[in-house]
Amino acid sequence: MSSSSASDLAGYIRGQGADRDARIEFADVGLRFRSFGDSLPSLKQTVFRKLSGQTFKEDSYRWLYRGLGLTIEHGCRLGVVGPNGAGKSTLLKMICGIYRPTTGTIKVRGQIAPLIELGAGMVAELSGEENIYLNGALMGYSRREMRAKIERIFDFAGLQGFRKVPIKYYSSGMMLRLAFSTASDLNPEILLIDEIFAAGDAEFVRRARARMESLIDASHIVVIVSHQLELIKQMCNRVIHVENGRVVDDGDPAEVIARYLAGVQAQTEPVRLGS
C-alpha cells in the first residue's frame, strides 16, 4: 500500500462528521472484480507465444454487487447472514474503504473500528511494539495517541516480555492476541466484526469476549458477520440475509434467521422419488 493510499484509508476509517449521529448509506452500489486470464508472463513466454501464434486468455469480470441500496442508522446492531461466497465480508470491506465501489456511492459518518482479518496488517520483521504503531497509523491514530495505549495493549495480550521481539518469532496465538488487543483498544462509533474472535487460553478468551461486549455496547453502529446465528439473534436488533450479491431479506433477527434456515434446509433436503 502506498503512503498516499494508506493515508486515504486512515482518513476514511477515522470517519467523516464524527460529531453527528453515525450513519452508513449505500446508494446504487456495484462492485466488480477482475479475474486475469493469464498470470503475468515472463518476457520469454511472451515472445514464444507471439512467434507461435498463441493468444493470451482474455480477462473476465464478475459483478459481486449491483444496485445495492442499504441504510444503517445510528443505534443499529446489524447482523449479516448468508452462505459462503455471498459477499458478507466484502460488505464490511466496502464500509471501511478497503474496496471502493465500481458504481454508486457509500457514505459513512462516524469513526470506524474494523475487527476483520486480524493480523493482516502485521509485518513479520517488525517487533510487536513497532507493529502496534504501524497498525495505529493505518487506523488514523498518531504516534502520540498509540504511545498512550501501548502499555495496556501489551498487558491485555499478556505479551509484555515480547515488546521488542519481531513477530515472526511469535506463535500464531500470540500474534492474534496482539492483533486483537491492538484493534479492540478503541472508542469506535462504528464497529465492524467479521466473526467473533477468540484465541488463546481460557482466561484470554473470557477477557476478549468481555471486551467485545463492551465495545458493542459503546458503539453507535455495529455490523456483525457471523455463522453463529444464535449469537446474531442475541446481539443484533436487525438482520439482513445476503446472497448472490443482493440483500434478499431484511428485518427482525429471529424472523430473518428462521426464513434463512428454512431456505437452507429446503436446498439440502434430498429429492424423494415416487414409488
Image: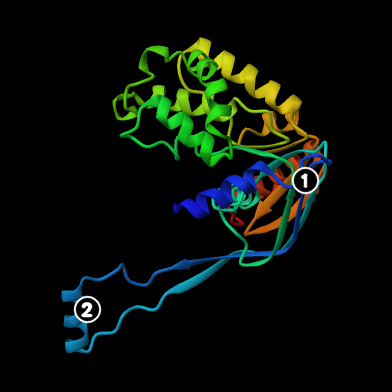
Q: Indicate which disc, 2 or 1, sits on the residue closer to the N terminus.
A: 1
The quarter in which the C terminus is drawn is: bottom right
Quadrant hosting residue 245: bottom right
Q: Position of residue 170 (x, y in %)?
A: 33, 24
Whether 218 is drawn above or below 85: the answer is above
Rate crowding at label 2 as few (under 14), some (14 to 19) or many (20 or more) other CA atoms within 10 Å: some
Residue 245 seen in the figure: yes
Whether 74 is drawn above or below 68: the answer is above
Q: Position of residue 235 (x, y in %)?
A: 74, 29
Whether 28 is drawn above or below 220: the answer is below
Residue at point 45%, 39% (across, down): 121
As helix, strand or loop, the secondary structure at mark 2 comes to helix
Q: Amino acid at mark 2?
A: Thr
Most extreme residue toward the top, as rendered?
203
Report which residue position mark 2 lands on.
Answer: 46
Report which residue position mark 1 lands on.
Answer: 17
| Left or right for 201, reference 266 | left
As helix, strand or loop, the secondary structure at mark 1 comes to loop
